[in-house]
């Protein structure tokens, strides 16, 4: 086992661009991305230290049973010791990048031990590297999304009047468990009026005729997440529901059409948002258009109105516009897209045309 040298060199290049000579990486997904070490340290410290002078040190508890690897020095501690003391000895004086995930107790202790070190926000070099997937990662994202397509097909075929949202969620959870996902993933099932809440907590409400059912589902497969939303109607659909659905679908397609290298993510958000605003529903589109995704379901940056980051080949993010009419219903349609050299590849193939079942 060895450090992923190609990824490490990209991180080091991003550090140089950010003016950082040294960083501490503690995000579980980022540590795994660079070292292959996958574990949950819980309240204990697991930290990867990198600097431009060639130091690569992983600090972890002996309980983790870490394995030495080529290109990485391992420094272990026990519960009886203070792991920050070992880390503090390795640091260079001056500025150091700290990622978003490090516990405050460790950071404060470090500042006490090394007053000559100045912590600054340091997530960006690793985030920028993880943001652009290599060819192996791109294929893993495709495979994960294909599984999600199959899950959506399975739950759509299970819709019956009288079933509860929770019973439909159980179909989703069971599918992921039975088909290789590392966890049962997540599922929002929001029927009828509940669909007007983008983050509705799935409940015991039953499915009835005329309900639009929002399914937002995803799970990690081989370490990479999927995420997709479809809105499916049960037995009948009103003219108002049709109009809202077609508007959201047009916004989804407009967002996808705007994706190409060099485009600021805020322009992709704007392309989707303009469709909804022009149709008179702007005040009911109450969230960003999307988020990046990979080893975590939600990764930085966002596809939002203020996001200046430029789309780059290998980036993967969601396009998920929605309209939410309080007290009535909601519609959201979400696909994952992968930025290519010419435009983008849509990773989801489950149909998006208005569907009525039952």
Image (tube, rainbow, N blue to C red):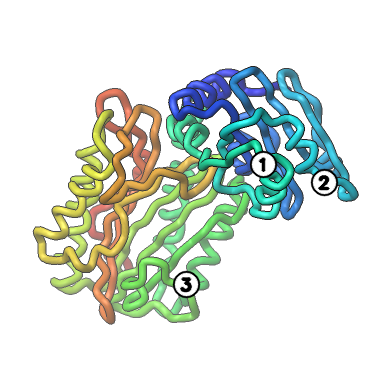
Against 22, is 83 above or below?
Answer: below
CA neighbours of label 2 inside 10 A, class few (<14), some (14 to 19), many (20+): few
Q: Nearer the viewer, mark 2 or mark 1?
A: 1
Q: Where does residue 129 sit, x and y in percent of width and height? A: 48, 30
Upstream in the sequence, badge 3 or badge 2?
Answer: 2
**Pointer 3 and pointer 2: residues touching (CB < 8 Å)?**
no
Confirm or deny contact between disc 1 and disc 3 (CB under 8 A). no
Q: Which residue is drawn at 71% across and 19% down?
A: 71
Label number found at residue 201: 3
Q: Which mark is residue 56?
A: none
Residue drawn 21% across the image and 62% down it: 245
Which quadrant of the structure image shows residue 30? Answer: top right
Residue labelled with disc 1: 115
Identity of the residue drawn at 59% across and 41% down: 29
Quadrant containing the N terminus in the rendered view: top right
Q: How far apart are marks 1 and 3 (CA)?
A: 46 Å
Dot 3, how many residues are within 10 Å of its Cα: few (below 14), some (14-19), or many (20+)? Answer: few
Distance from disc 2 to disc 1, alpha carbons, whole Å, reads: 17 Å
**Figure disc tally:** 3
Q: Mark 2 points at which residue?
A: 82
């Amino acid at each position: 086992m060895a450090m992923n040298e190609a990824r490490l060199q990209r991180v080091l290049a991003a550090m140089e661009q950010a003016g950082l000579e040294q960083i501490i990486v503690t995000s579980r997904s980022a540590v795994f991305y660079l070292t292959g070490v996958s574990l949950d340290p819980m309240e204990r410290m697991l930290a990867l230290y990198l600097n431009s002078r060639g130091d690569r040190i992983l600090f972890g508890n002996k309980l983790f049973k870490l394995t030495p690897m080529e290109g990485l020095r391992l420094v272990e501690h026990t519960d009886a010791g203070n792991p920050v003391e070992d880390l503090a000895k390795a640091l260079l004086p001056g500025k150091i990048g700290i990622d978003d995930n490090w516990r405050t107790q460790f950071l404060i202790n470090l500042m006490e031990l090394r007053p000559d070190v100045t912590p600054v926000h340091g997530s960006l070099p690793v985030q920028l590297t993880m943001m652009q997937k290599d060819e192996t990662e791109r294929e893993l994202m495709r495979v994960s999304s294909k599984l999600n397509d199959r899950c959506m097909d399975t739950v759509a075929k299970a819709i019956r009047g009288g079933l509860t949202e929770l019973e439909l969620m159980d179909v989703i959870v069971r599918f992921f468990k039975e088909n290789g996902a590392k966890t049962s993933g997540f599922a929002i099932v929001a029927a009828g009026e509940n669909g007007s809440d983008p983050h509705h907590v799935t409940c015991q409400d039953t499915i009835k005729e005329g309900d639009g059912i929002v399914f937002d589902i995803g799970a990690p497969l081989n370490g990479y997440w999927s995420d997709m939303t479809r809105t499916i109607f049960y037995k009948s659909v009103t003219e108002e529901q049709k109009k809202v659905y077609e508007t959201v679908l047009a916004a989804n397609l407009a967002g996808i059409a705007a994706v190409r290298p060099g485009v600021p993510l805020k322009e992709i958000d704007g392309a989707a948002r303009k469709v909804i605003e022009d149709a008179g529903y702007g005040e009911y589109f109450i969230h960003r258009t999307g988020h990046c995704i990979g080893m975590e379901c939600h990764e930085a940056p966002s596809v939002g109105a203020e996001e200046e980051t430029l789309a780059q080949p290998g980036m993967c993010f969601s396009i998920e516009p929605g309209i939410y009419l309080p007290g009535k219903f909601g519609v959201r349609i979400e696909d994952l897209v992968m930025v290519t050299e010419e435009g983008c590849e849509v990773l989801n193939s489950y149909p998006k045309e208005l569907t009525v079942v039952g």
